[in-house]
Image (cartoon, grey):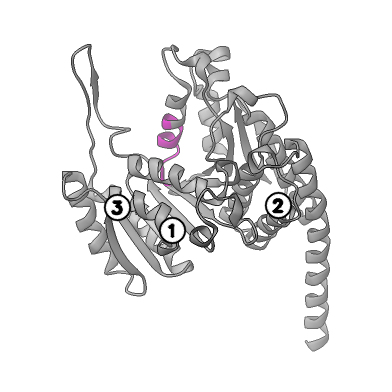
Amino acid sequence: MTRIVLLPGDGIGPEVIEEGRACLELISDAAGLGFEFESHDFGGIAIDRHGMPLPDATLAACKDADAVLMGAVGGPRWDDAPARPEAGLLKLRAGLGLFANLRPARVMAGMEALSPLKAEVAAGADILVVRELTGGAYFGEKSYSDDFASDTCVYTRDEIERVAHVAFGVARQRRGKLTSIDKANVLATSKLWRRVVNEVAADYPDVAVDHLYVDAAAMALVTNPRRFDVILTENMFGDILSDEMSVISGSIGLLGSASTGGAGPGLFEPIHGSAPDIAGCDIANPAGMIASAAMLLDHLGHHDLARLLDAVVEEVLAEGCRTADLGGDARCSTFGAAVRTKLETGLVKMEALRDLVAMNRGCCG
């Protein structure tokens, strides 16, 4: 049995997570994976029901799970709440020890025209951002008054080393190039960041390394995105740059993410927000959630099934089934159903291929 905790959250979160869950359930049933799902309150809905964005019971369930799939959190109705929904997300990441956030973005062949960049600039872009997730200004000491405010940005050698090893490891599996992004000409934390990344690089002689200041990187993402393979950066820079990067593919609704750490469960979520203005309208794009479900499968070791799910989503998009953010008229539920229809066919073909391979091995044995 594999326990997957669902955190639907707020806004469009419940709509898109249902499409991701349905895809995982279909795969589990077909492949005999034994996935079991349980939902828990998280974010603004948890504030309404429990007075806090991350109830103790939700955190305990996440810690006991094999993986966590999250929808989205937040919305203007909780702007004045004592603890905002986003605070629950920071606490969840810290509670699960999730220090590395992986955010991939790729311009799919045939969909270059959807990018706000010129097609010849966007074509072939394929980037993975590895963002440090539990340090920096978001977690530093804060003070606030009518006349003064401060956010302390702190990084330790250990925090930088562990996320750097993650980034170098995935760079080895991709095209073997890593760009570390900092502001080492101004910030002390960035000076340490650059030094430690260079030291870790010595363990990965097969990975080419370069460094960019964050402002130069922001410019390069929209002028020459193909120069990047893996981007490694700190928490706040990674948050901003990955959102900038997301539009290169055509819509932030296409992209999923994975947050990982030590031996505990990973957290998988689309990078879009809760979009409360369209909640309940069945027009949200669930592709990013389904991409997150594929990353969950990959994290659990089901690599072939993850690749199949990704390929099916691309096929559905290429055939013109697209939600409003991509210029189409497909509903959230319609897109999910189209993915599952093709997924069923793909799973049957995969099983038939496995049977054929097993039969051939038996004959040759």
Tell me which corner region of the image, top left, top right, bottom left or bottom right, holds residue 161: bottom left
Q: Are marks 2 and 1 in contact (CB under 8 Å)?
A: no
In depth, the one of 165 and 240 nearer the eye is: 240
Q: Residue at x 75, y 38 (%)?
A: 329
Alpha carbons under labels 2 and 1: distance apart = 22 Å
Q: Position of residue 152 (x, y in %)?
A: 22, 31
Task: First in sequence, mark 2 or 3: give its number.
Answer: 3
Q: In the figure, is residue 165 to the left or right of 188? A: right
Q: In the figure, is residue 54 to the left or right of 153? A: right
Q: Position of residue 360 (x, y in %)?
A: 81, 82
Secondary structure at numbered mark 1? helix
Amino acid at circle 2: Leu
In depth, the one of 47 and 332 nearer the eye is: 332
Label number found at residue 216: 3
Tell me which corner region of the image, top left, top right, bottom left or bottom right, holds residue 362: bottom right
Amino acid at circle 1: Pro
Tell me which corner region of the image, top left, top right, bottom left or bottom right, holds residue 206: bottom left
Number of dots carrying numbers: 3
Tell me which segment is drawn in magenta.
90-100
Task: First in sequence, mark 2 or 1: give its number.
Answer: 1
The residue singled out by tag 2 in the image is 317
Q: Residue at x 53, y 24 (%)?
A: 43
Q: Position of residue 99 (x, y in %)?
A: 39, 45
Amino acid at circle 3: Ala
Q: Are marks 1 and 3 in contact (CB under 8 Å)?
A: no
Alpha carbons under labels 2 and 3: distance apart = 33 Å
Label number found at residue 91: none
The residue singled out by tag 1 in the image is 225
